[in-house]
Amino acid sequence: MKFVVILLLNLLLIFAFPQNTQAGEIANRLAAYPNWNGKPNISQAEKDLIYPKWMAGTWKATSILREQKAPLSPEIVTPGFEKNEKYLNKPFTFQVRFKPQNLSNPSILSLSSLAPKKNLIVADRTFNGENIAKAYLGENKVLSVKGTSDNPNRQITFLADNNQLISTITGRSQETPNPQEFLTIEITQQLFQRPSSIYLNEVETTTDYQLINPNKVTAKQVTAIYLSPEDPDYFKAINTPVAIYEYELILEK
């Protein structure tokens, strides 16, 4: 089950949340892939991600795992890494939605400098998260997906058999090198909770969205899995990723 949860979280993060960083840092990190020897230097996550206006609407999303690497193998390999090979080059499709932000929520956009802006575009996280989860796990495995009113960066996926996936975005950054391109990094802590056990780790998701035309967006997205301090192998890996996954994303209106 763990390898499915890792892939599910990777997809949930694609439609998550980021803040500005020095221009070019994210592009440089993607250019250095897969030679990632440490975590990115990014800001603490506080508010929701504001997407470009060309992301607004409902899309058919196709996600394809193109490559996976285990930089510290054979000494350290994440649970289910080898089983993930069956997902290589296999497309998964689901609907995602981006819509104008609800400014009545006081936990979002508290900065006065942003308050006058209208029609800021954010992800419909509950809609997106539930569709992604059902696409990967199956309709009968996903009970519901809920956000929290006091924290736009926290989401809980309620699964069958009293299992829960709790994901909390802790850091983020973004770049807009040109009007047709949008790059993001987000770091999340994930907790997969079963009645008898808990599994923890940290995930970096780095994505380069490109507007092809008003009805099509493509992206390269790389996720890196880091061990949590509770893992027995943590001090062997420290901030080196123990698994890296590269996805191709296609969004069509």
Image (cartoon, helix red, strand yellow):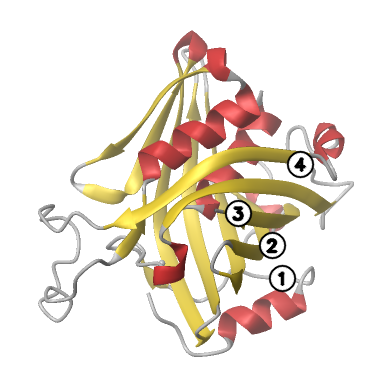
Q: Which mark is residue 37?
A: 1
* Residue 24: quarter of image: bottom right
Quadrant where the N terminus sits is top right
Name the amino acid, label 1: Asn
Q: Nearer the viewer, mark 4 or mark 2?
A: 4
Q: Nearer the viewer, mark 3 or mark 1?
A: 3
The residue beneath circle 2 is 240
Identify the secondary structure beneath mark 1.
loop
Query: Residue 228: in sight, yes or no?
Result: no
Residues marked 4 and 3 touching at CB (< 8 Å): no
Query: CA gap, disc 3 to disc 2?
Result: 35 Å
The first of marks 3 and 2 along the sequence is 2
The first of marks 4 and 3 along the sequence is 4
Query: CA gap, disc 4 to disc 2?
Result: 28 Å
Residues marked 3 and 1 touching at CB (< 8 Å): no
Identify the secondary structure beneath mark 3.
strand
Indicate left or right for 144 with 136 as reference.
left
The residue beneath circle 4 is 91
Could you say which is closer to the camera, residue 192 or residue 27? 27
Query: Where does the image place residue 169, in percent across and percent down from the top left?
Result: 41, 54
Name the amino acid, label 2: Thr
Query: CA gap, disc 1 to disc 2?
Result: 5 Å
Taking the spot 51% from the left edge, 33% from the top edge, the residue there is: 131
Q: Residues within 10 Å of mark 1 (few under 14, many from 20)?
A: some
The first of marks 1 and 2 along the sequence is 1
